[in-house]
Image: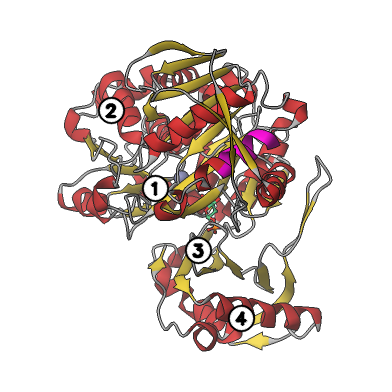
Amino acid sequence: MVNVNTVQTKPFEGQKPGTSGLRKRVKVFQQPNYTENFIQAVLKAIPESDGGAKGATLVIGGDGRFYLNEVLQIIVKLSVAAGVKKLVVGRDGIVSTPAVSCIIRKIKATGGILLTASHNPGGPDADFGIKYNCSNGGPAPESVTNRIYEISKTLQNLEIADIPKVDFSQLGTQHIGDLTLEVIDGVKDYVEYMKTIFDFDEIRTFFKNNKDFKMLFDGMNGVTGPYGYRLFVEELGLPESSVMRFKPLPDFGGAHPDPNLTYAHDLVERVQAENYDFGAASDGDGDRNMIIGKDAFVTPSDSVAIIAHYAKEAIPYFKKHGVNGLARSMPTSQALDLVAKKQGLEFFEVPTGWKFFGNLMDAGRCSICGEESFGTGSDHVREKDGVWAILAWLSIIAHVNKSKRMGVQDILQEHYKVYGRNFFSRYDYEEVDSKGAEDMVERLRGMIEKNELVGKTCGQFKIAKADDFAYHDPIDGSESKKQGIRIIFEDGSRIVIRLSGTGSHGATVRLYVEKYSDNAAEYPKPTQEALKPIIDVALELSQLEKFTGRKEPTVIT
Ligand code: G1P
Ligand code: ZN
């Protein structure tokens, strides 16, 4: 028998899950009862349609960041008290976000708790995060996250089992009262699944026949290191020098584990200096990815379009299941739209955040999707999947190289020849004053409502349409409003402005710009040069500097 204690608590403000769960500074989670409160709210909010917490099977995994073990202990104590039947936890708590999704689906679990702040830095002075995923393996929909928040606002008691500290370092099954706790190898199921999706023999053959083609994978000291090692070194037989920073570290070695040209500069430099043909990186929890080549950077918007273009030819999973529709988040460039049009596929534009793709996938209407924020994925799981995207690219490379030698840059240029090029860039202004940022968006919203923008000429551009993006989910009928200011010009170029929903404090302004060209002479142009005129228009229209006091963005991707 396990003793359960009822412990008095009081609600904490702001336990409202954002785009991807609750993300706060570690210090916030460390306040007495703060984490307990949130986990209690999560357990109470598990939807009845999934069976609720009593008798549930939950998959638990995280990216190895600081404070993970403490939170695991709390989850076990509250789960035992809540009557959860089974917890399936990765060894040392390590399971990537897409792998949690994979395991939830594979074992038909009730849901899962993901312990990660994704690409945000880790360590005692950095971030932690907790996210709940439902039985489809995807992030909880707003109905569930709102319920978590509502419960968190009135919580008076915690039900905590009185149990000794649990050891998560050994594989195997333990029993704690009525709860079964299984510690699993968080990499194994995922690797097995990847072997059913991609043709590993074909990729292996490509590397064997092209010994001079070198690849470098950067785990960024996050969770994907062990996955990359298992897949690229052990399965594909590449030398160990093909993987870097492949051991998960609690503070990511001080790195900012976000795979973009700014934060993954170690990889970018090595690919250039050591003449690698293909470079790839994942973020802290393994759902994001970046693909680069010799003198080539694949924007995530292009990446998803190229994967969609080759999917049925190059990837066995799509040969078998077909491609039932494509989708992108609203700010993502329109390169994918062109592929959907050419292939006659159903197409969706959804708000930022992976959860919107899940409904479409569950309904069998979306097979491949992506976000400009280095998120690419498919309906094989219900999260974006960085390692999957890298394997997709290796499959494409193996496929196109059957007829002629092609590197990453050649694949890009070939794609532009067929579809034209959607130049795209995002400017992030991090940790700006919230009031200024909100006022800036409010002003644009006001101009849209008063219809002051349409018809206006800005330099070489004329505004054709302006709105605050709203999405009507065709599956569950839900409405999501105020998803970002969208200014579309007559030539199809776009400006999008929205505030981040994942920041842990202050506000982050995201400014997205896109310009289409079907003039082949322009394709080799550097992105920033091609976009300069539209960026100037964006800064002028938004009066960003006036409202935020920022002359330069923190990060350009
Ligand atoms: C950011 C990205 C978004 C992504 C999310 C989670 O959200 O922009 O595309 O889904 O992280 O990885 P934001 O901070 O913009 O709300
Ligand atoms: Zn992530």
Disc 2 or 1, which lies upstream in sequence?
2
User: Which residue corresponds to mark 3?
Assistant: 424
Q: Position of residue 516 (x, y in %)?
A: 56, 65
Comparing labels 4 and 3, the label whose residue is closer to the camera: 4
Circle 2 residues within 10 Å: few <14, some 14–19, many ≥20: many
Q: Are marks 3 and 2 in contact (CB under 8 Å)?
A: no
Quadrant of the image for the N terminus? top right
* Residue nearest the observer in this picture, 224 or 93: 93
Residue situated in front as seen by the camera: 18 or 394: 18
The vertical placement of 111 against 469, above or below, is: above
Residue type marked 1: Met
The answer to whether 489 is drawn above or below residue 95 in the figure is below
Disc 1: which residue: 290
Which residue is found at the position 34% from the left and 58% from the top?
261
**Pointer 4 residue:** 440
Cα gap from disc 4 to disc 3, whole angstroms: 22 Å
Q: Range of the magenta residues?
A: 37-45
Residue type, label 3: Phe
